[in-house]
Amino acid sequence: MKEPLVAPSILSTDFAHLGSTLATVNESKADWLHVDVMDGVFVPNISFGTPILKAIQQHSKKPVELHLMMVQPERYLETFARFNIHQMTVHAEACTHLHSVVQQIKRLGCKAGVALNPHTPLGCLEYVIQDLDMVCLMSVNPGFGGQEFIPQTLGKISLLKALIRRKGAAALIEVDGGINQANVTDVISAGADAVVAGSSVFDSGDPSQAILTLKNGAL
Ligand SMILES: O=C(CO)[C@@H](O)[C@H](O)COP(=O)(O)O
């Protein structure tokens, strides 16, 4: 089995120590940093906005994926792109004109991802999948770290893989929520390329080792 790409999510970390958290991630084998922006409307939680993104830009050496858990993300894409963002991932459920938003992200020079909530069918990707760099399957209901992995995600990953193959698309599959050492092998075996992990990395006491364990655990 291939080694999974691992993206630590800083949501559950202590923001009083953001600098040292980012330094740890910089020195780790993490493939990119997963950054959750939540608006309190699309999801019940509010996380952070541009001041934190500016600090991340200054201190992160890893590519940054912004996961935009917000309604009408198109209003902020241009602002966020100024913070040297590698990829922006928007929710299909939050975009009336998803294809147009994806094109907007690409015009800003970023890779484009689309996230789907656990209950959202894959059919909404049928006519946009060729334009995507990544699909993020939520394996928890978005809004909070530390939740339990929803097992139905495994079947959804396989179906998404089949859709990507059928369409001749190149999108990576990322799975986000409740990922840990116990389930990462199943997630990668089902066809995922990348996992997002928050609490299993940062509550572990040794984030660098936890990232390595996720990578090796799936081999
Ligand atoms: O988007 C989200 C939650 O909405 C995730 O990125 C979480 O931050 C992942 O945290 P864990 O489930 O791994 O604790």
Image (cartoon, helix red, strand yellow):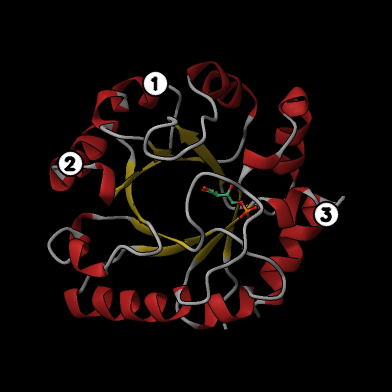
User: Which residue: 75% across, 43% down?
Assistant: 27
Local secondary structure at mark 1: loop
Check disc 2: other Cα within 10 Å, few if <14, some if 14-19, many if 20+.
some
Instruction: Give the residue at mark 1.
Output: 82
Q: Residues within 10 Å of mark 3 (few under 14, many from 20)?
A: few
Label tally: 3
Determine which quarter of the picture holds residue 128: bottom left
Question: Residue at label 3?
Answer: 204
Of residues 68 and 189, the one drawn nearer to the viewer in this rendering: 68
Sequence-earlier tag: 1 or 2 = 1
What residue lies at 44% left-to-right and 31% top-to-bottom?
40
- The CA span between labels 3 and 1 is 33 Å
Instruction: Kindly report the distance in space between the C-alpha atoms of the residues bearing marks 2 and 3.
Output: 38 Å
Q: Return the residue nearer the eye: 55 or 203.
A: 203
Observer able to see residue 115:
yes
Q: Is residue 20 left or right of residue 214?
A: right
- The first of marks 3 and 1 along the sequence is 1
Q: Amino acid at mark 3?
A: Ser
Residue 29: percent from the left, percent from the top?
Answer: 69, 54
Residue 72 falls in image quadrant:
top left
The residue singled out by tag 2 in the image is 103
Q: Amino acid at mark 2?
A: Gln
Up-down: is 80 above or below 190?
A: above
Q: Is residue 108 visible?
A: no
Q: Secondary structure at mark 3?
A: loop
